[in-house]
Amino acid sequence: MFDGIDLSKIDLNQMMGQVQQMAEKAKEEGAKKVFSSSVGGGMVKLSINGNSEVIDLEIDDSLLEDKDSLQILLISAMNDVIRQSDEAKKSMAMNMMGGMNPFANNS
């Protein structure tokens, strides 16, 4: 599988350092991104940042007396923003991994 590749030239410490740097960069960039969902005709609006931290929540006053509907709409909004955030994270990871080649000639 690794025929013709000199595995002794792969610096695992350097590779791990790159992974750590990429993870820190992703966390910093994630905090800047915002994912929003509006459900129930705008009765519930939820926003999270790329680190999955809730940054805004708006609930229409009419839902305060309808606990079941409120729960359903909150769950729907949460699932939607989490899906958006996960897709963005996967895309970012794929882009980052594309730039990391442990078999590149580093000499």
Image (cartoon, rainbow, N blue to C red):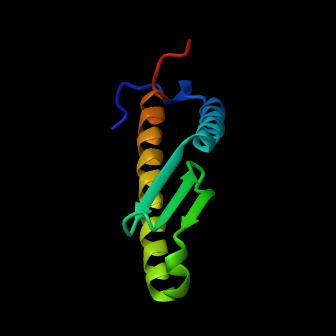
The picture places residue 3, in percent across and down from the top left corner, at 34, 30
Quadrant of image for the C terminus: top right
Residue toward you, 45 or 17: 45
**In this rendering, position of residue 24 left or right of residue 91:** right
The picture places residue 43, in percent across and down from the top left corner, at 45, 68
Residue toward you, 26 or 46: 46
The picture places residue 24, in percent across and down from the top left corner, at 66, 39
Residue toward you, 60 or 11: 60
Quadrant of image for the N terminus: top left
The picture quadrant where one finds residue 86 is bottom left
| Above or below for 16 versus 44 | above
The picture quadrant where one finds residue 13 is top right
The picture places residue 51, in percent across and down from the top left corner, at 60, 51
**In this rendering, position of residue 91 left or right of residue 27:** left
Residue shown at the point (38%, 69%) measured from the top left: 40
Residue shown at the point (50%, 79%) measured from the top left: 63
**In this rendering, position of residue 24 left or right of residue 86:** right
Residue shown at the point (55%, 74%) measured from the top left: 61
| Above or below for 33 versus 58 | above
Residue toward you, 3 or 92: 92
